[in-house]
Image: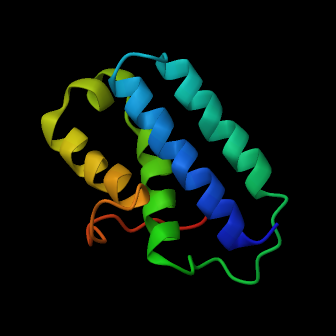
Amino acid sequence: MTVESFINAKASQLAYFVRAFWEERIPYSEMNLYFWDTLEEWVQIETSTHEPDSHKERVFWHLLHQIHFWPEHKLMLDPYLRTELLTCVEFLEGAQVYPLDCVGVRP
């Protein structure tokens, strides 16, 4: 699997998990499990650099980091954070322009 195919597959999943969490269709623990599963799969991908290759990859790593960094209540209730993360989700879904304030780095 290439980095690009990994990001393409995982980006839509990540957007789904974040929306499902906000809509209270899944608990935070499921989103946290997705985080760890994604990292476990990532270590199996061959990469030649530590720098993300595309805007989509940068937003993906930023959003993945944010859902793990912030506590559950902040992700759910902080309007500023939710607005920032929604912009990232919408970009990953193809409905938004590249958010300049979402700069992710590969683990």
- Quadrant, the C terminus: bottom right
The correct choice, above or below, for 12 with respect to 32 in the image is: below
Outermost residue, left side: 79
Q: Residue at x 22, y 42 (%)?
A: 81
Q: Looking at the picture, how far across and down is residue 53, in whole percent?
A: 57, 81
**Dividing the picture into quarters, in which one does residue 59 lie?**
bottom left
Q: Looking at the picture, how far across and down is residue 69, in whole percent?
A: 44, 40
Question: Do we see residue 107 in this rendering?
Answer: no
**Dividing the picture into quarters, in which one does residue 43 lie?**
bottom right
The correct choice, above or below, for 102 with respect to 75 in the image is: below
Question: Do we see residue 4 in this rendering?
Answer: yes
Q: How is the image coloured?
A: rainbow
Task: State left or right for residue 30 relative to residue 41.
Answer: left
Q: Nearer the viewer, residue 50 or 18?
A: 18
Q: Residue at x 76, y 76 (%)?
A: 47
Q: How many marks?
A: 0
Task: State left or right for residue 49 relative to residue 32.
Answer: right
- Quadrant, the N terminus: bottom right
Q: Looking at the picture, how far across and down is residue 95, in whole percent?
A: 31, 59
Q: Residue at x 28, y 46 (%)?
A: 86
The correct choice, above or below, for 103 with respect to 36 in the image is: below
Q: Nearer the viewer, residue 33 or 19?
A: 19
Task: State left or right for residue 14 relative to residue 46.
Answer: left
Q: Residue at x 81, y 65 (%)?
A: 45
Q: Looking at the picture, how far across and down is residue 32, in whole percent?
A: 56, 30
The correct choice, above or below, for 56 with respect to 21 in the image is: below
